[in-house]
Image (cartoon, rainbow, N blue to C red):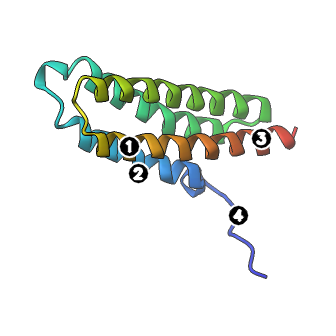
Amino acid sequence: MEYPAKVRSFTDLHVWQQGHVFVLNIYKETKLFPKDEQFGLTNQLRRAAVSFTSNIAEGFRRESYKDKVRFYYMAFGSLSEIQNQLLIARDLCFLSKDDFSKLAEQTVDLSKMIKGLIKSSQDKK
């Protein structure tokens, strides 16, 4: 049986890797938002998406599991923000139903992954 390589960096975390893909997708989709939303919903979505992966990265480097979990919960909060903002973007017709569905599905998957990371970190206390 082959074991996975030791996680040495936040970039080795599957949730961070998928989160990074999600950030890139958010940037791609928000490029198409109306120009007058540049400092509104576009900025909010981008900042929350970057915050998701940034909090995972910062939490990974924390020494105590309590600190790790705190940052992972902040990442989880950013994901909830994104879900709310995606609903607004959909309802304002800034996103097609298909694009909204793809991004919303990614948030559900990321939510499950971050909950798993939180649980595994709490179990190590």
Is 35 displayed left or right of 96 in the figure?
A: left
Give the residue number, with chain letter if any, for mark 1: 101
Residue type at tag 2: Val
Tell me which label, 3 or 2, sits earlier in the chain: 2
Q: Residues within 10 Å of mark 2 (few under 14, many from 20)?
A: few
Is 78 displayed left or right of 50 in the figure?
A: right
Give the residue number, with chain letter if any, for mark 3: 119
Give the residue number, with chain letter if any, for mark 2: 21
Tell me which label, 4 or 3, sits earlier in the chain: 4
Tell me which label, 1 or 4, sits earlier in the chain: 4
Residue type at tag 4: Lys
For label 2, the SS is helix
Q: Distance between the residues labelled 2 and 1?
A: 16 Å
Query: Percent x, y for residue 27?
Result: 28, 40
Query: Percent x, y for residue 35?
Result: 11, 24
Judge by depth and name the residue closer to the eye, 61 or 116: 116
Residue 41 position (above or below residue 27): above
Q: How far apart are marks 3 and 1 (CA)?
A: 27 Å
Tell me which label, 2 or 4, sits earlier in the chain: 4
Residue type at tag 3: Lys
Q: Distance between the residues labelled 4 and 3?
A: 18 Å
Query: Percent x, y for residue 13?
Result: 60, 53
Give the residue number, with chain letter if any, for mark 4: 6
Q: Quadrant of residue 71?
A: top right
For label 1, the SS is helix
Which residue is painted at 29% across and 24% down in the image? Answer: 91
Tell me which label, 3 or 1, sits earlier in the chain: 1
